Amino acid sequence: MKSYQIQEFYKGIDIERSIEFYSVLGGIPLYLFEFDPEKNVFENIQEHVLTKGEILYEEAETLLKEELKEYYLYVSIFEAIAKGKTRLVEISDYSKISQKDLPKFVSTLMKLELIGKEHPITEKETSKKTRYFIKDNFFRFYFKYIYPNKTELESGKIDTIISRIKTDFESFVGFEFENIARDFLLKPDTIEKLPFSINKIGRQWGKIKGAPKGKNTYEIDIVALEESRNQILFVEGKWKTLSMNSAFHLLNKLEDTSNFIQWDHDVKKRYFCLIAKRIEEKAVLRNKGYLVFDLDDFQFTNNELHLA
């Protein structure tokens, strides 16, 4: 089940809550049945994920034990990625699995669609700049917030953990919101509003030539390309409510960051886009030539995501 099908599943849940639920649970109906759409996401997490004895409390580890031998090695891979170790060498160092053996374990998790990999969108598929990420939403939530806090949860410190989740939750949902934003940009009715037809889309990151160590990297949430006409769209995704000034600042920063990209095409036209939870005075930003969308522009109908 996709994010835009959650409203249909829960019959009337608002779009913001549906995205929050999906970011935690993914699209597995068994998990979705556990959450009460009348309660907010934090109440549901506290009651159905952080509470010992509930189905979701042990679910991720139970599945790994049932499906995989040496499950503890797979757990260490999830731990590593959840802590931001996204390259094979980093995962190997953290998990203590040799670089020789690690690819077979990673390959197994990819076949199960629990983890995925990506490379900078402007580079070829064979690029060595590969990053790994936890693809399954519930596993991503579990190994970020549940597994590393099991000792405290076992001793009943649920309020402590839910407080930690609340401080970081905007960023956590933001990761999934970027995926939703990609889907949104590729929908036919959205494409009609874009300056070109997208034939390639993904994340972009790299080194900044000549910059000092510690300040020599950049990353852009979404970059969309039309390679045949050398056009490029830079997109910032934010799961936040933004004032016009904050939105304008982000777009200016995005323009600056776009200059660091090395693409083997002679770029003819650059466009800049902001997609957020809420954006004040979108019309002003659009009049300045920016593409700007928020949840008011999203419409989930007939199990599909559309431009409102």
Image (cartoon, grey):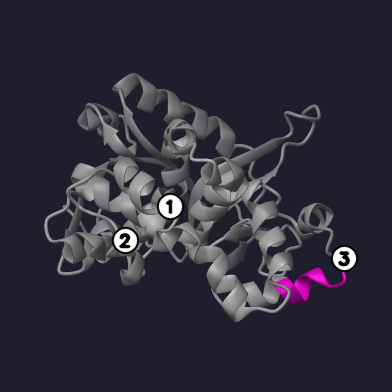
The residue where tag 2 is placed is: 3
User: Which x, y percent locates residue 139?
Assistant: 52, 60
Judge the density around disc 2: few (<14), some (14-19), many (≥20) Cα neighbours within 10 Å: many
Q: How crowded is the residue under tag 3: few (<14 C-alpha within 10 Å), some, or many (20+)?
A: few
Q: Is residue 4 left or right of residue 142?
A: left
Q: Is 199 left or right of 85, judged from the image as shown?
A: left
Which stretch is magenta?
99-105
* Quarter of the figure with residue 265: bottom right
282 with respect to 237 (left or right): left
Q: In which quarter of the image is residue 22?
A: bottom left
* Kind of residue indicated by mark 1: Glu
Q: What residue type is labelled 2?
A: Ser
Q: Is residue 214 above or below residue 97?
A: above
Q: Can residue 194 be seen in this view?
A: no
Q: Mark 3 points at which residue?
A: 98
Q: Mark 1 points at which residue?
A: 176
Q: Earlier in the sequence, mark 2 or mark 3?
A: 2
First-in-chain label (3 vs 1): 3
> Quick one: 229 or 199, which is closer to the camera?
199
* Residues tagged 1 and 2 counted as in contact (Cβ below 8 A): yes
Secondary structure under badge 1? helix
